[in-house]
Structures are given as structure tokens and as C-alpha cells.
Amino acid sequence: MSNAISNEPEIVYDKQGNPHEVVDFNNDYEGAKLGFWLFIFTEIMIFGAMFLVFGFYLFQFSQDFMDASNELNRLLGGINTFILLISALTMGLSLVKLRNNQVNESKKYIWITIILATIFLTIKYFEWSHEIHLGIYPGSPTLNAMEHGTKLFFGLYFTMTGLHGLHIIIGIGVMFWVLALIHSGKVNSTDFVVLENTALYWDLVHLVWVFVFPIFYLIY
Amino acid sequence: MSNVHKSFYDQTHTVFGHHKNKILQWIFSIDHKRIALLYLFVMFSFFAVAVMVALVMRLELFSPGQDFIDPNTYNQAFTLHGVIMIFLFIVPGIPAVLGNFLLPLQLGARDVSFPKLNLLSWWLYMIGAVLAVTSLFIGDGFADTGWTFYAPYSIKTGTNVIWALSAAFILGFASILTGINFVATIHRLRAPGMTFFKMPLFVWGLYSTSWIQILATPVVGISLIMVVLERTFGIGIFDPTKGGDPVLLEHMFWIYSHPAVYLMILPAFGIASEIVPTFCRKPIFGYHAIAISSAMIAGVGYLVWGHHMYTSGESEMIKLIFSALTFFVAVPTGVKFFDWIATMYKASIDFKTPMLWTIGTFVTFIIGGLTGLIVASVGVDVYLHDTYFVVAHFHYAILGGVVFLMFAGMHYWFPKITGKMYNEKHASRAFYVIFVGFNLLWFPMFIAGMLGMPRRYFDYLPEFEIWHKIATFGSWVFALGLIYMFTTLYRGWKYGEKAGPNPWNATTLEWQIPSPPQLENFGEIPYVDYMPYEYEKGEPVHRLDLSVKEKKTHE
Amino acid sequence: MSTQNELHPVKASVYFNVFYLLIGLTVLTLAQPMVMDLNLGSTLIVQLGIAFTKAFLIVAYYMHIKSSSSLFKKLIYTTIVLWIVLYTIMAIDTYYRYTPNDLFR
């Protein structure tokens, strides 16, 4: 017997003669969603742990953290927040369009999401360049001469925004992959769980930023 | 001519392509049964390496003073032993081998939910293993921090800490993917009619374990990443000279590593719950209690990690809270032991090797568990922390609990996996040799610890010498017993008698198909509306033949 | 996929409505420090309150939890409860470790 997708579901009968369908693991929408949600839980645990570390040091070095927060560029950070928010919308819309069999519209929205994500990364690059230009980066002599709290704030800033940025880069890669799958017809209006999971992933990336932004930028 | 007499050894599904080469057919196979065996062989190879490292350590400790390895090498040795045993052997452990093989069979499924992800887990495991081993031969050699990687030493030492941590991170990822696979499988692929409270208890153990794998592993993953970043970029998170706090790393590390020990023991308890009813030939006592206790251990196990840190500088208030919670988490385990012993009460017990191992485990794990409660008491632990008492405690619990039950499970499911039966006489003798060697090796350490012998010490005062000598002698008996056992199993596989589908007269679904199983596991999936351990007058109530038959019309 | 026909129909309007709410909340977050001069504790309460509201909207609507089976809802609650417990324990230790309120002092 091959594991190829068969159109005949396997039926099992109980003692009363009622039929029960056996779930085919090769064709299991709920299972695919469940599996991806479990992966999202692992991401929540990762970022939750980082927030824990942040909270721990915020409690200890409150004034230093607040002063350092004042140094960050709220305009750029705020623009990035709006960009990511819009990108979450466009990602969700691409799923709606695909389910309505508007394939080209769906692809268009994915492209817009990719472009917005790239703009986010570009702005982040400028923010980082500014700090590094001032000599503020982990291990730098300038930073090492500053207060403990300031060192920790920027150490956590680069680490957490870096980790978040890494997830955005991965997300862009996944979006290109999904575009290819839609193009080849493997992801379509009846078999769309890959796009749905991609949208879930992007929502997670957005969700993390929803918390990262205020705790780093808005505690001044 | 017919396909039906072929087993999964003869044919397989691979992740891509069709291969003539047998080795490629194994390492690219997406059949959960083959993946289980891939894990088995690699894991036990590493187990052998770690045992040999331990034998070398014990040999060095036979007499005080330096004998044939220097102090820094000794530090690397116990780190290597710990990293291999924990990350490469016992954490993948029972889920990767017996779980992968049996979960779909016990549920009445044809594979796990994500077979390709399953193969990826194994490949990630291999990559992590290779990384860890490679670091032995590069630069300053393997990390010498202990497997617990405490800061600030792990940040300052020149040995290959980043290699070891990267390996641990990748291995953790493999563990997470296995957990995701198992949770999805258990939710989605149970046979029709099988509700959660009709699943075998081994599955309950795997389910609870998988939740720990999913939720706890990421925390240590990010902690290890932070140590890597600390070493590379000097972020300052755990570096006291920059305002960082080493105790925070201990918190983050143990938030995973304590639930990790429950991740180790829960599948093992599941194995005990399978073996006891089979060899007592009666339904297990307290099925619901055992199932719920597995979930409770997983849940409460998240709340006790601070008992590893009583002497590290946490607040007095939290020490009391952790101590109380640690006492509390022992209760569900007590429930399990009560139920197993109640099952054995007035039963006509068949003392075959799997049952011997299980009963032997009851002895050693009770010692391990009770000594755990001793060190869970803050006042006592102030004296016993970082002594040989703790070392003896966790070896009684992990080796005498998890590994012994893994051996029990290996003997129990040996006929199912291989289609052959091992020699009962030699297998039971091997058990006795290992059991005696085990106690000779570890029990003196309780005494040495109470007398003050510190752990991870390369050298010691002459007053401890006798205990070390007994322990080292015990290590030889133990190692000989292991060789005896593995030889018996190997010979059983090669030359043993053919075993039928159900040599133990057990009741769960894996015993209703041929040994070894066919590729698709089942010809027809049964409708399961009965409890898993139904015996009537010593005989299983439900006997089914679920093998793949010749004239099946559906694919 | 037989579950296809039973799936909750997805409308673009849901996405847009939530989007406008999220925009509004984001404007609030940015405005708060400029309009209200609060100490750190109160700032955190307001900011995290808004953040959690946004998070709820995202999880419930964008990530479809509101229209998913109860299994997914239970799983989310489990993860949230786990974090609440872990944060509480860490908070207890941090508080008592760095202040003179600890026991036996």
C-alpha cells in the first residue's frame, strides 16, 4: 500500500454498524494546524524567557533602563510598528483571497507583505547603525564605560531585536517559498494550510513586536 | 509472491527518491519503526562511550591523588559524560526509540502525524551529536564546565563551550520536533473509538513527556544561546562585571532541566504500567489515577526547579516555596507506585525478565525518590548539595529508574521489534549482575556524601578512599553486566527462536499484529471501545488479528 | 479534505475591523508617555495593558482562535497559565533577593 494521497477515506465500523472515518495523516488539515500551533508555543516560550530576563534587569536597574530607553529613536520605532501592523493585515488578506480562489490577488498581498517586511528590516538597520556609529554595541569600549544598567539595556536591545529580526528574515524566506508553491498550484483554494500557517507565523512575529516595542522604546 | 509476509525490514517509504542502496533506504526512511531503530543504534553507541568515560573517571578515583589523567582532563571527562548521557542518550531516550516505534502501533495508526519531520528530528540529532563529538578534538578540547554550564566560568573558560552549547541547542530542537509530532499524533490519529481514557498508559506517559519537550526545551535553548552571545559579544547578561547575574542563568537553565527529568521518567513509568498488568495477568489497578498522575507530574514538575539552587543565593522565601512544591510533586509518583503494587497484590506473577527489571526498578527508584526528598529539605541540602549524596540520588533515579525501565521495555518489546526471542536464562542473570553492580557502585556514594565527599572533585582525602574503592569495583561489575545483557540481546536477535505476534499474552494493539510489524502496521484499523488492559481469568479479553492480509482491495 | 466544508468562512472585513482597532491602540501607546507623566510602574501597567489587548485581538481574530475548536483555546490557556506561574515565581525570588524583606533576616 502506498502512502499517496487517496481520495477514499478509510472507514471503520463499530458494533452498532456506525461508520467512523480514520484520519489520514497525509491529508490532515486540523493536524497540520495543531502541529504548527505547537511550534508557535515553542516560540512563545523562547521570547517569553527573553522578556523574563528583561523584566529581571528592569527591576534592578530601573533608572538606567529608563534613561537608555530615552536614547532610542521613537519615530523610527513607531514607524516600524505601523509597518508591521499593516503587513499583518496584508498577510491575512492574502489568505482570504486564496480561499476565495483569487490566486493573483493572494500573491499580490504576499508580495506587499514581503516589501513591508524588508522596509522594517531596513529601518532597523538604520537604527542599529546609528547606535553602532555612536560606539554603542555589545562589548564596545564606549558601552563598557557606561553604567551596568545601560550596558544590560543595550545588550538586551541588540539581542532581542536581533532575534526578532532573524525571525523576520526567516519569514521573508518562507513567504518566497509559499509564493512558489502557490505558483505551482500545490497551495490552492482547497489546500491552503501552508499559507494559513505562514500567516500564523507572521502574526507571531507581529505579536512579539507588540511587546518588544513598548518595553524598549516607551519607558522613558 | 505475496506482500504480506514482508516486514518493515524488507520495504520502506523514503523521504525522496527510490534507492537501491540499503543504507540510504534506512537513513532516508520516513517509517517510524526504522527511525526508532536508527535512534536506537546511535544512542546506545553514545551510551557506550559515556559509560567508558565514567569507567575511566572511576578508575582515576580508585586511589587518591593523580593516577593517570590530569585535573583539567578530569573536568572535561565529567562534562563529556554528563552531556552525552543527558543530551544524547536519556533526553531522546525512551521517546525516540520505544516511543517512535510503539506510539502509532498502540494508537492503531499507520505512522506519526508528520513522518518527514520525524526523520528530520533524527538528522538534527545526528548533527548535534557530531558537533558535540567534534569539539573533543579541536582547540582546547571539550568543555570543562560540567553539563550545567554555570556562569561565570562557562563564559570565561577557554574550552569549546560554544560547540557544546550549539550542539545542545540543535539536540533540543530535535527533541521539540519529536514532542510536536507525538502530541499531534495522539490528538489526531487515535483509532476510532479510542478516547483519551482508553489509551494505553505508555501513551499517556509519552503525551505528558511531549508537552514538557515542547514547552520547557525552548527555555534552555534560548538560555544557551544567550551564553553563546555572552561569550562572543560580551552582552553582559550573566557577567557580574557588567551587572549581569549568574544566578539568573541558573534559574533559566533549571526551568528546563528540572522538567527534563520528568521528561525522562514519565515514559519509563509508562513502560512499567504496560509490563505490570501483562505479567500479573490482570487489569491495572487505578488506570485513571495513573493517567492523571502523569499529567500532574508534568504540570507540577515545572514549579520545582529552584531546589537545584538552594545554595546558590536565591532568597530564603523562594527556597521554602520550592521545597514545599518539591515535596508535593512526589505525591503523584507515590500514586503510581501504589497502583502498581496494588496490581501485583494477589496476582499470579510471571517473573520473566521484563518483570524482573520492573520490580528491580521499584527498589532502586524508591531509593532514588526518597533520597530526593531528603535533599529537597532545605536544611539538609545545605550540607548535602554538591556532594556524592546528590550524585548517588540522581543516578538511582535516572539510571535505576529511567534506564532500568528502558531495559525492561527493551526486553518486553524485543520480540515485537525483532520477531525473535532472547534467551530467558541469560537475560535474567544479566539483570541480577547489573542490579548487584549498580548497588555496589552507587550506594557507597550516599555514605561518602554524608561524610562530606564533594562531587566533581578530581582528588579526595584518604578518609573517603574505601568508599571510592567499593564504587569502582561496583562499576566493573555493572559494566560486565551491561556487556552480558547486550550480548544476550544481540544473540537473541541473530540466533533466537522466532516469536509470534503475542508471546506475552498482552492486550494492547501492538500485540495483535505480526512480529516484526509490516510496513503499514495494520491491515484494518480496529474500532476500540474497550479499556487497554482487559483480562478475564488471566487471559486477554480481546484477541484480534489486525495484520495486512492478501486480498485487501483498498490501497 | 473533508473538513473543508465545515470551516469557518473567512471574511476580509474581520481583518479590516481588527486592523483599525489595532491602529487605534498603537496610537494610544505612542501618545501615552507624551500625554501622561507616570512613574515606571504605572507606565508599565498602561503599556502592557494596551499590549495585552492588542495581543488578544491578534490571537483571537488574526490567528483564528476565536473560531477554532476548544482544543486550541485550552492549549493557549495552558501556555498563558504556565508563563504566569513562572513569572510569579521569578518575581517572588527577585523581590525577596534584592530587598531586606526576606525571611530570616
Image (spheres, coloured by chain):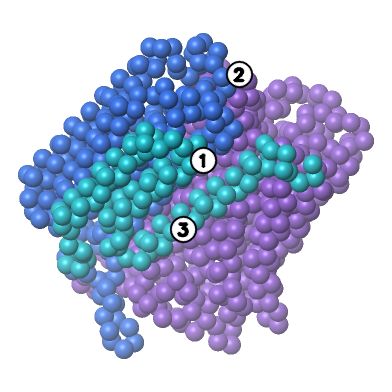
Residue B335 on image: x %, y %: 66, 70
Q: Quadrant of residue C37?
A: top left
In this orientation, which residue lies closer to the viewer: B161 or B302? B302
Secondary element under disc 1, as helix, strand or loop, is: helix
Report the residue marked by disc 2.
Answer: B158
Q: Which mark is residue C41?
A: 1
User: Disc 1 is attached to a residue of which chain?
Assistant: C
Q: Rounded to the nearest whole Å, what is the CA distance between mark 3 and mark 2?
A: 41 Å
| Foreground disc of the pair 2, 1 | 1
User: Disc 3 is attached to a residue of which chain?
Assistant: C
Q: Colour of chain B?
A: purple
Quarter of the image containing the N terminus of chain B? bottom left
Q: Do marks 3 and 2 share a chain?
A: no
Q: Residues within 10 Å of mark 2 (few under 14, many from 20)?
A: some
Quarter of the image containing the C terminus of chain B? bottom left
In this orientation, which residue lies closer to the viewer: A71 or A181? A71
Chain depicted in cyan: C
Mark before the other along the chain sequence, 1 or 3: 1
Q: Colour of chain A?
A: blue
Residue B145 on image: x %, y %: 65, 29
